Image: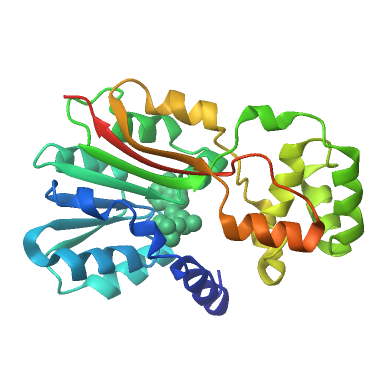
Amino acid sequence: MNGNILEEYNAAMQQGLMDKLYFLDYCNEVHNIVDFGAADGSLIELLYNRFGNTKRYFAVDNSLEMLDILHNRFQGNPCVRVVGDMQDLPSIFGTDKTAVILSSVLHEIYSYGTDLRQFEKIIFGGGFSECPEYIFIRDMSLSRTANRPIDINDLLRLRTKANPSTLQEYTDFWGEIHSDRDMLHYLLKYRYEDNFDRENRENYFSLPYERLLEVVGNKYYFVHHEHYVLPYLRNVIYRDFGITVRDNTHVKLILRRKQ
Ligand SMILES: C[S@@+](CC[C@H](N)C(=O)[O-])C[C@H]1O[C@@H](n2cnc3c(N)ncnc32)[C@H](O)[C@@H]1O
């Protein structure tokens, strides 16, 4: 990523940062906070400003560019450790009560598909005796039921109102729009015209809601469960296309390990 795109990307990620702190109250109960997919570290910085040196913070990322930014941002702060290899996490979970934040990162992990088994094992405790006390998940996730054929009227609305060039780019990459899932995938991307090439290639729905529940497994219970459509998104899609979104596109979860 070049400098400008990286800055824009991080600026976009910072929007809505406050909404991302829905789990704040539960941080009081843990000593370690792990932000998995920490990007530029904005969330960790907010948490550090809130809880200070009463906690230890771990900023995990696998992008060399982000790791560079994280090292620069937190150098000299003894409470924050930057982690480039998830293999280091089990030893952290083993020390004190830990919360792991998975904010807009699961869809990337399942999209690229590398180290999936290792990830599931480490985070959701498939094999290690210790697993985190809390896991906070906020991401895009769609039910498989959205694979139903698209309503012909919605398809017409989409074709009439969409920017022809982004729609073409989308269908060139993902194939023709046949289902509500295909339609929603485009509708979650069309606003990013300036950065469409990058956003287009990312699979936003790489982790279906049903599969997400399987991944969570039996070691955790839900303290908070929301499967929803962002109200802002619902409104702009109706404004721009006259299409009513009927499927939940996002999840916001707080999971607690069973004792
Ligand atoms: C969409 S950003 C989300 C950033 C931030 N968590 C937020 O909510 O704004 C995803 C971040 O996860 C990182 N990432 C993707 N796959 C990863 C993996 N397997 N291990 C660690 N980090 C990963 C990416 O480099 C990127 O910085």
* The quarter of the displayed image where residue 80 is located: bottom left
What quarter of the picture does the C terminus occupy? top left
Residue visible at 20% across and 73% down in the picture: 75
Image coordinates of residue 213 in percent, x first then y, are 45, 27
Residue drawn at the location 59% of the way across and 44% of the way down: 249
Residue 176 at x, y percent in the picture = 85, 42
The residue furthest top is 218
Relative to 35, residue 249 above or below: above
149 above or below 157? above
Instruction: Say whether residue 41 is visible.
Output: no
Q: Position of residue 28 (x, y in %)?
A: 14, 52
Residue 64: image x %, image y %? 41, 62
Way the structure is coloured:
rainbow
At horizontal 15% and vertical 71% (from top left) the residue drawn is 77
Q: Quadrant of the N terminus?
A: bottom right
Quadrant of the displayed image that contains ligand 1: bottom left
Query: Quadrant of the rendered structure where residue 87 is?
Result: top left
* Whether residue 256 is visible: yes
Q: Which is nearer the eye, 3 or 134?
A: 134
Q: Is residue 57 left or right of residue 147?
A: left
